[in-house]
Amino acid sequence: VIRAAYRPPTISPQRAQSYLQNPAWHRIDAHFGNAATLVAYHLPDGRFQPGDIVPVTLLWQIHRRLPHNETLSVKLLGRGERLLGERHRYPGKGNAATTVWPVNQWLLDQFSVPISQAFALPTAARIGVVLFHHEQNENSALPVKDSNGNALGGQVIFGRVRLEAKMENRVPGWPVVQPLGDHFGKGQLTLAGMTLTPRQTAPNTPVDIVFRWQVHKRL
C-alpha cells in the first residue's frame, strides 16, 4: 500500500489522549475563534543558541473549516516579547490548509523555529502562536481565548525554552562573581552569580543588574 504523500497529520483520539497524559506535554486549551483549539504543546529540554533550530510541537482539535487559507505563525519571544525567531506556513506543513481542515479530528503540527537574533545574556524564550490571513497581516489574526474564556487578543503565549548567548556575543564579565554562594530560605535558593551592565558608569546613570539563581525546592 502506497500512502499518500500529501495528507494532513491527523492522529487518532487514543494517541491524542496518550500525549495529554504524558507529563512532557502541557495542556493549554487556547481557542482560536470557533475554528480550532490548541489543546497542548511539547517543547524540548536543553539549551539553545542563535542559529539553532527549536522544535515546537502543537496538538490541535479542529472544529470547523475557515473560508480562507490562514497562515500559522510560531514565534520565539524574548524579554519584552522581542522577536528572536519565527516560522510562518500553512498548518500541517501545508497539508492541512484551513479551508480543508479535517473537521472533528486531532491534528499534530511540528514546527522547526530558527533562532535568528543574537543576544548577550542567558535568557528564556516563550512561544507565541498566531493564526492570520496571509494576504493581510497579523492584525487580521483570529481572536484567541484562554481555557477560561478570557480574551488574549490575536496571540497565545506559553511555554519556556532556555537560551544561552554564543561566546562572542556574551556580555564581558558574565558572571561577575560565580558562585556567590548565598543561600536563601532552608536551602531552597542559591544566588549563584550576577552581572552589571555597564560595568563602569557615571553617577545617576541606570545600571542593569541581572541575578542568576539556582532553584533547589519550591517555596
Image (cartoon, rainbow, N blue to C red):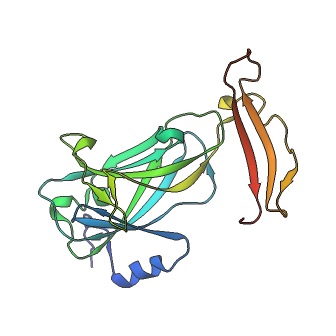
Q: Furthest-left residue in view?
A: 67
Viewed as shown, does residue 188 lie left or right of 150?
right
Q: How many marks?
A: 0
Q: Quadrant of residue 41?
A: bottom left
Q: Quadrant of residue 151?
A: bottom left
Q: Furthest-top residue in view?
A: 202
Identify the residue at image location x=46%, y=77%.
20
Front residue of 13/150: it is 150
Identify the residue at image location x=46%, y=52%.
127
| Residue 37: percent from left, percent from top | 31, 67
Q: Quadrant of residue 104?
A: bottom left
Q: Furthest-front residue in view?
A: 204
Identify the residue at image location x=24%, y=53%.
142
Indicate whether 13 appears above or below 7: below
| Residue 19: percent from left, percent from top | 46, 76
Which quadrant would the N terminus be assigned to in this image? bottom left
Viewed as shown, does residue 1 lie left or right of 54?
left
| Residue 192: percent from left, percent from top | 81, 47
Viewed as shown, does residue 172 lie left or right of 11?
right
Identify the residue at image location x=76%, y=23%.
199
Front residue of 3/168: it is 168
| Residue 21: percent from left, percent from top | 49, 80
Indicate whether 169 appears above or below 71: above
Front residue of 79/184: it is 184
Which quadrant would the C terminus be assigned to in this image? bottom right
Indicate whether 205 appears above or below 197: above
Viewed as shown, does residue 34 lie left or right of 39?
left
